[in-house]
């Protein structure tokens, strides 16, 4: 016989008390336990509602980051440009400009005109330049590269050079931090070597980059 209302499909344990009386306790099934835990988590802010909450928050953060990036570009906080000269160059007498021809990636806060980088805002910038020279067997063997910053009026505002005396194939590079007081300044790569000495073209051998570090000048 069974006790009224007792379901034998539910596992039970018989517990005997000190007074000899017997009481029955229904054990929760695993599914019941999991359901209770799920209900507790939802009640405390987790679950489907919580997932939606965090999904909305992630979308808001992404939107905010995009807005900050656009604002920084408009305000001149961000600036960068990278390019190289696709064709090589045979040097003539004296120092000559090595114009960049191929843009790498986007230009932000910078425009490229006639192989030069025109900077769109004041502040602290950094220029990196590189060029590779071929072998040269006679005469003067000194080579140099110079990153130059010009004012809007065409005067040299800042420059840095790397010089080496060799007839062997050689690559020179320059890293140049500098500040400008306003937009309109521009950056160029200049080279100097014996007449007829060649400079290699292509992104493997040369390049010019500018990156803005800060809107502050000092």
Image: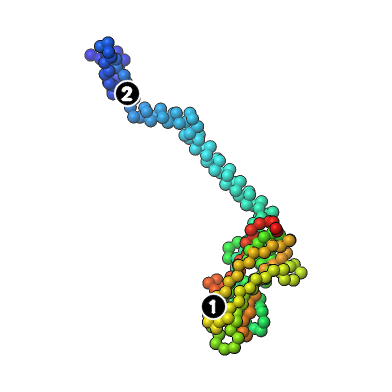
Q: Position of residue 46 (x, y in %)?
A: 48, 34
Q: Residues within 10 Å of mark 1 (few under 14, many from 20)?
A: some
Say which of 149 and 103 sits in front: 149
Q: Is residue 32 visible?
A: yes
Q: Which residue is mark 2?
A: 27
Furthest toward the left, the residue is 1
Q: Position of residue 123 (x, y in %)?
A: 69, 59
Question: For the point 34% across and 25% down, which residue is it?
Answer: 28
Q: Is residue 99 visible?
A: no
Per the image, label 2 sits on a secondary structure element best described as loop
For residue 104, what is the image quadrant? bottom right
Question: For the point 50% across and 35% down, which residue is it?
Answer: 50
Image quadrant in which the C terminus is located: bottom right
Q: Position of residue 190 (x, y in %)?
A: 65, 75
- Left or right: 93 with respect to 205? right
Question: For the point 62% across and 81% down, which residue is it?
Answer: 193
Query: In front of the other: label 2 or label 1?
Result: 1
Q: Which residue is mark 1?
A: 170
């Amino acid at each position: 016989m069974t006790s009224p209302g007792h379901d034998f499909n539910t596992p039970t344990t018989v517990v005997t008390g000190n007074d000899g009386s017997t009481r029955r306790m229904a054990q929760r099934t695993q599914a019941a336990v999991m359901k209770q835990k799920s209900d507790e988590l939802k009640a405390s802010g987790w679950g489907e509602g919580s997932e939606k909450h965090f999904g909305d928050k992630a979308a808001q953060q992404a939107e905010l980051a995009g807005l900050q990036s656009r604002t920084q570009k408009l305000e001149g906080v961000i600036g960068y440009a990278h390019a190289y000269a696709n064709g090589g160059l045979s040097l003539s007498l004296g120092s000559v400009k090595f114009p960049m021809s191929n843009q790498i990636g986007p230009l932000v806060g910078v425009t490229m005109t006639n192989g030069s980088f025109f900077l769109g805002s004041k502040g602290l910038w950094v220029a990196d330049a590189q060029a590779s020279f071929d072998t040269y067997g006679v005469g003067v063997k000194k080579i140099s590269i110079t990153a130059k910053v010009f004012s809007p009026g065409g005067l040299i505002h800042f420059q840095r050079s790397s010089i080496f005396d060799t007839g062997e194939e050689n690559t020179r590079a320059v890293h140049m931090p500098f500040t400008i007081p306003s937009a309109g300044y521009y950056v160029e790569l200049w080279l100097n070597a014996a007449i007829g000495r060649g400079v290699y073209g292509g992104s493997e051998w040369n390049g010019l980059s500018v990156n803005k570090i800060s809107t502050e000048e000092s």
